[in-house]
Amino acid sequence: MPTLALIDGNNFYCSCERVFNPALNGVPVIVLSNNDGCVVARSNEVKDLGVKMGTPLFQMVDLVRRHGIRVLSSNYTLYGDLSRRMMAVIGQFSPLQEIYSIDECFLDFTGIADVRARALALRRRVQQWVGIPVCVGIGPSKTLAKLANHIAKKGLHPTAVGVFDYAALSSSEQDALLGRISVSEVWGIGPRHALSLQGYGIATVKDLRDADPRLMRRRYSVVMERTVAELRGIACLELGEVVSAKQQIMVSRSFGMLIERYAELREALASYMTRAAEKLRAQRSVTSAVLVFIRTNPFREGDPQRHVSTTVPLACPSDDTRILLQAATAGLRQLYRPGYRYQKAGVLLLDLTSALTIQADLFDDRPGERGQRLMQTVDRLNRHMGRDTVRFGAPNVRQRWTLRAAHKSRCYTTRWDELPSART
DNA sequence: TCTGGGGTCCTAGGACCC
DNA sequence: TCTGGGGTCCTAGGACCC
């Protein structure tokens, strides 16, 4: 039986902000989504106030003022860099690590004599070396490791202090514990499934673990059947170390303000497509179809609504920004209608395949290799000199559609001019 | 006034074929 | 009034995750 650990950073974005700004320690902190729209991270103090994930900022201005909540725009450059450092330290504790998200990873602890001691040491080292508090959940399957992590974080068991090992419990202790946790805490059980399960009398994790797997498959899907097995300690989800190439690449944003004009939409989409093409080349893929979408603000019920998308096939799979920009513009031309106030747009690269097996387009008169060398050069320049040093079609930066980010912290670890200073 | 972004997997149902 | 059956492939949409 495998032993898996799930490690994640507590209130990760808030903790990242606190690393370089100690004044944020012990006070309520929130980090906002793009455009300063919703809450995407809450410090414990804010969670204690009952603020839910995803709450729009404008709905809590009062609370912010009353409790002196510190409000921050998201700084993904900082979080990404601290994530890399955190993952590197965690990776020292096992030969097999699967990085699952910016703040979470699985480790293989199979065969380790004292997993609890190992987990405690890991926790101490990440705190000391990176400054991020983490919790460790340990179990015989990914789903149980995730659940153990939840137990560790909430202190749901006397032995759970930042670290919790599910397998260390006797089966009667396991029953009692799972009987006290809502089924909605299980990985893969979202709000819809939780509600539906409750209709069948399945309210706790224990209820779900003891449900008939075949029946669950029939009522829901093979995913639910797997979840039941995982809760029983039968590992169905493998630990994967290699980050496989993405099957789709999406870049989309809400605008800083509503947009009506075609030219502005085109600029915004060109900027998103440029970024998408960079991501595509970074994973050495090519795309053969591009989906473009634009939409109005669904929350403005009085406004005429439009929510449309179109897929533009490419004659030949490509990773060339110029070709992809043409496709984005062609898509927009199809979709655009005047008289609407657009709030968001995006591009989605579909049908990704490896760039190494690309087939030449018989009708392409552009020498493919020269195009590739050009793209490589552009990517290298932008990587070293900063994003958008070189770009196509030269959209002016800082347009009306660009994001709002009124409370952004500095890029302490990735920009020379924004390094923290010990004394000023 | 103000409501994120980027993914994955699964299923149902239609199109199409023989 | 009668109007096959089974397989495959593709797409849209749902549900979930962080």
Image (tube, coloured by chain):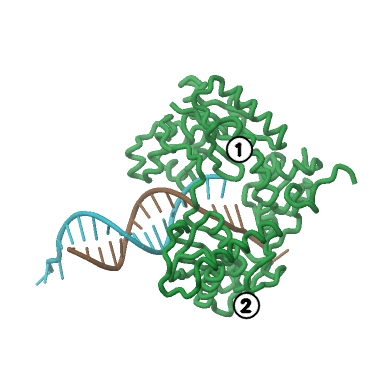
Chain colours: A green, B brown, C cyan
Mark 1 and mark 2 lie on one chain; the one further toward the N terminus is 1
Q: CA distance from mark 1 to mark 2?
A: 43 Å
- Residue A133 badge: none
Q: Position of residue B11 (x, y in %)?
A: 35, 51
Q: Quadrant of residue A313?
A: bottom left
Placement of C5 over or under A347, stated as above or below: above
**Residue A313 visible to an observer of this rendering:** no
Placement of A148 over or under A81, stated as above or below: above
Placement of A154 over or under A357, stated as above or below: above
Q: Which of these two is toward me, A353 or B2?
A: A353
Locate residue A30 relative to residue A293 in the image: left or right. right
- Residue A263 badge: 2
In the orientation shown, which residue stands out farthest toward the right?
A: A424
Q: Are marks 1 and 2 in contact (CB under 8 Å)?
A: no
Q: Amino acid at mark 1?
A: Asp
Q: Which residue is mark 1?
A: A8
For label 2, the SS is helix
Residue at x 50%, y 43% (from the top left corner): A242
Dot 2 falls on which chain?
A
Locate residue A120 relative to residue A236 in the image: left or right. right
* Quadrant housing the N terminus of chain A: top left
Q: Amino acid at mark 2?
A: Ala
Dot 1 falls on which chain?
A
Locate residue A76 relative to residue C8 in the image: left or right. right
Q: Position of residue A126 (x, y in %)?
A: 67, 33
Placement of B18 over or under A261, stated as above or below: above
